[in-house]
Amino acid sequence: MKKTFWLAGAMALALAQPALGADSIKIGFVSTFSGPTAAIGNDMRNSFELALDHMGRKMDGKPVEVIYEDDGQKPDVGKQKTEKLIQSDKVDFIVGYIWSNVLLASLKTAVDSKTFLISANAGPSQLAGELCSPYVFSTSWQNDQTPQAMGTYMNQKGVKSVFLIGPNYAAGKDMLAGVKSTFKGQVVGEEYTVWPSQLDFSAELTKAKNSKAESIFVFYPGAAGVQFLNQYAQAGIKAQIPLYTAFTIDELSLPLQKENALGVPGAQQWVNDLPNPENKKFVEDYRKKYPNLRPTFYGAQSYDAAQLINSAVVAVKGDVTKKDAMKAEMEKANFKSVRGPFKYGKNHIPIQNFYLQDVVKDADGQLALKTVATIVKDSQDGFHDKCPMK
Amino acid sequence: MVLVEQSLNGLQFGLLLFLLAAGLTLVFGIMDFVNLAHGSLYMMGAYFAATFTAWTGSFILGVLLALGATLLLGIVLEFVALRHLYGRDHLDQVLATFGLILFFNDAVRLIWGPAGLALPLPAWLTVPVQIIPGVYYPAYRLSIIIVALAVAALLYVVVMRTRIGMLIRAGASNREMIGALGINIKLLFTLVFGLGAALAGLAGLMQAPILTVQIGMGENILILAFVIIVIGGIGSIRGAFLAAIFVGMIDTLGRAFLPDLLRTVLSSAAASTAAPALSSMLIYLLMAIVLVVRPEGLFPAAKR
């Protein structure tokens, strides 16, 4: 109610004095703030707010206004919210997007209106390939990259066969395709589950167990990761078949997965203990500002998204109508990313390192994620050739 | 071997759905009251169990306390809000109880935060047990089967063999008449609603260690519960029991065997995509067929 009131007020003001809008940088932020995966959206918002705090809540001296919108994890709602932010709020940048299917539904609106869209998580293969756009940047990865790193790690470990399980939507298919593209052993089975409604994985686990595969790979973000891991451990499969994951264990799911996650490896482009000074500052200040919470990779990517926008705004001295100059600046990735330095491919997807992370007990006796090794250096997605941009 | 295991998976899922559907069918059938907030009670059961288990340090104690708490919550809810809606149109009830879903979701967000809780199992429930030679089954899933069967038996005895049960059955057949015969129908309704709430809470807390304890956890599964009471016949516990096992079996076996079946006719990629969609449709297909062939459900309660 209050929000509607303010929005109405802001809109009335924008109508009365069109010049006023130019004095602030307007950013729309679409993520999931309700339902079972709201914790992810909260972490992204927290990190984005922290980044703004670190900038003094100004970009090139101009105040920053952020409008957060909830997509409810639904593509149609995400598209509506994107349209609203672009058409009636007239935002300069639009950021966020956890889910590949939500992003794909919202993409056209942003591209057609030439509004810069920065994906702080979702990385569907189409975005890196045929749907790449001068107005779209990613501060995350292309979906296949992380599981590709996992597949490479499994080769390094000498794993001979794998059973793949993932959710039946855009990202799930990309993830399983990613592992298959690098894993040299045999893929014994491949199961897709109904997303996001299926919560019980007993049928799939039974199949995996009876497939005699040497390993299982899964991709289950958010609460589904908790459910999968709990069921995997309870079924006693943990002692028999080792599990390899992508985006299944993070700082949000770990407090719920507890000991079930111990020793289950994952691949990630950012881990909380990466030793660069920006990352230390990010993690420490995050934990100070939000006691009892720990930042996740979703948050790190959102923090980087704020920095990327800032770099563009500073380069054009606050004149956000200079889109070509902003695009050119963003392509340089000229900011101190919390994952360490990276470059952009021509499709605006990062070329970056992927690390092996493991679950360990930290100094306080709490479960935490820890970087174990670098799996691949400067990994680039496999779809950049399909992107017509130069 | 695989078939045995998958059937157990289906049975376990079905019995869990039965716990949820039993309460719903009691309230719907006997009180003629559409309670969309049934899923919220399921959620509350899980949150109570997680909280009490953390407080007491004992899973069993936590579960028992949570059962009592959901029962109490159900009774209070009936007394404060729902009893004013009995005479109203079904649409009013749907609106009001939908409002309750929003209320409970936000109340949970305020009290426990948005992140969800964990309900860890005691060690003796986390090991797989050998049920027949060569087939291991998770102890906890087995315990769900046992508890749900025990509850089903208990419900049968209470409804078919006791005076309260007689009144409940009478209420399901003809509400006005048992009121006219001097039975305190208000008290009976409060009791039935409390019982329904406790059953929903039991389903929620039994499911909690397998799934997560989170906001909105009751909403997806409530749809299945409605499907079950439609298939089984509204107000019929026996119908809910059999329909729940049907639905559990069809859902699980569909997921287990449909992909391989489809792969024999379709390309592997197409089959992988189509199978989960198709298997999740199967139960709705079943419901549609039941509605066409026997609109009153497979095992309807005796009507006036």
Image: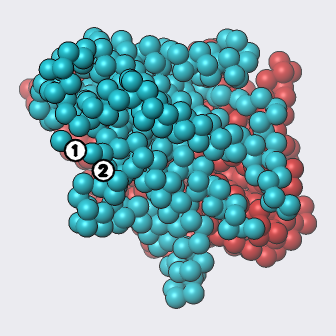
Chain colours: A red, B cyan
Q: Is there CB contact under 8 Å for labels 1 and 2?
A: yes
Chain containing mark 2: B
Q: Residue at x 32, y 26 (%)?
A: B167
Expressed as whole percent of the image width and height from the top left, the position of residue A352 reads: 69, 53
Q: Is residue A298 visible?
A: no
B66 displayed left or right of A267: left
Amino acid marked by disc 1: Lys
Residue A54 picture quarter: top right
Query: Mark 2 sits on what residue?
Result: B300
Expressed as whole percent of the image width and height from the top left, the position of residue A41 reads: 48, 34
> Where the N terminus of chain B falls, by quadrant?
bottom right
Q: Is residue A216 visible?
A: yes
Query: Mark 1 sits on what residue?
Result: B303
Expressed as whole percent of the image width and height from the top left, the position of residue A160 reads: 86, 71
Q: Residue at x 90, y 61 (%)?
A: A157
The residue lying toward the viewer, choosing from B88 and A174, is B88
- How many residues crowd around disc 2 within 10 Å: few (fewer than 14), some, or many (20 or more)? many
Expressed as whole percent of the image width and height from the top left, the position of residue A206 reads: 71, 60
Note whether B98 is above or below A286 in the view shown: below
> Where the C terminus of chain B falls, by quadrant?
top left
The residue lying toward the viewer, choosing from B49 and A21, is B49
